[in-house]
Amino acid sequence: MSRERPAHSGLRAHVVVPDRGVDVHLDVAPDECVALVGPNGAGKSTVVEALAGLLRIRSGSVLLGDRDLTGVRAHRRGVGLVAQRADLFPHLSVARNVGYGPRADGSGGQEARLRSDAALAAVGVAGLADRAPGTLSGGQAQRVAIARALATEPALLLLDEPTSALDVDARTEVRSALGTARTGRPTVLVTHDPLEAVTLADRIVVLEGGRVAEQGPTAVVLGRPTSAFAASFSGLTLLRGTATRGGIALDDGGALASSTGTAPPGSSALAVYHPTAAVVTRDGAGPERRVTGLEPRDGLVRVRAGDLVADVTVAVAAALGLAPGDAVRIAVPADELTVYRPDGPTPD
């Protein structure tokens, strides 16, 4: 920017909204991006609205460093928000859109233009400064929206599903801009996109029913989830059971071997695998289950059989003649199954 960016402090928030069933503690370090994930209605948007000051909370607190923002109005919080849609002012040029925040904060015209130019350059769209918003593509408009947030030099950045309205190609460019924007400041990212979480987030907080169901470093939550949503989010099948010397005895019956077990034998354990690793047969190896559902899935057929899930080719599904209610056996190679304790510790 045109002036030295102030050092940013961390966020400590306790968002309590009884009528929405939300009670969430959230801490974000000064240079950390935390992804909030969870099913629809879990409370993600409520948390963002409370942090932004768009929703007044009667109990709880929002602390940013030594500042108590709990009762502060939205425009005085120093919080930048990038939502699903850019919502640029149609009657202003791109440069004036981005410079609007600095002007509203009291900066003169020259200072606002300098900060606008720096923010646009930071996200790779300096060449759009004189364009009208109506001439921009979706990806360009969203990068301008990110620049608009950056130009205010926010003490906290909120990203509320910032790429969900974009096509696949535009998402790649916008993720790069988001990576620039989140650097050096506490950032909260709401997303339904696992790649976005992997690319941007240092840590993941899983919300379910207005509460924190699970949290931890991104690699841990996605690689060794303890909640059903986190497993689904990362594309894995989550199993529960008791650790054995060579794998896991499943709560629903049967056992699977694992070459990557980290839970002591006899202890409660979780196990995960990717459904494409599973092998479905009529009378081969693996626990026996009855088919509870068949779904098309990215060119494959997802076979649901109780706690076990397998993704097989259409040819395999046809050859087996699968139908709901059929008995099948599902095996998972030992090197594809990870067994671990539900409460850690998790090895690096």
Image (cartoon, grey):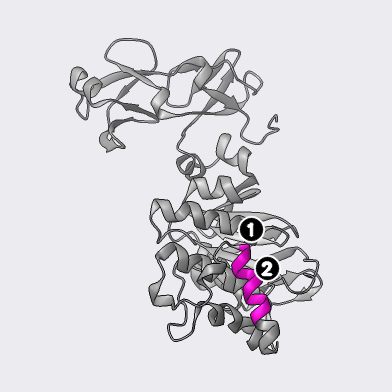
Q: Would you call the spot at circle 1 few (<14 residues within 10 Å), some (14-19), or many (20 or more)?
A: some
- Residue 205 shows up from this direction: yes
The answer to whether the residue labelled 1 contacts the one labelled 2, judged by CB atoms less than 8 Å apart, is no
The x, y position of residue 290, in whole percent, is: 28, 25
Q: Would you call the spot at circle 2 few (<14 residues within 10 Å), some (14-19), or many (20 or more)?
A: many
Residue on which the image places disc 1: 180
As helix, strand or loop, the secondary structure at mark 2 comes to strand
Q: Magenta residues? A: 113-122
Does 19 appear above or below 41?
below
Does 57 appear above or below 233?
below
Residue on which the image places disc 2: 156
Identity, as a three-letter code, of the amino acid under mark 1: Thr
Badge 1 or badge 2: first in the primary sequence: 2
Give the left or right position of residue 113, taking residue 209 as reference. Answer: right
Discs 1/2, front: 1
Q: Give the residue at the far top of this rendering.
A: 284
Q: CA distance from mark 1 to mark 2?
A: 14 Å
Secondary structure that dominates the magenta span: helix
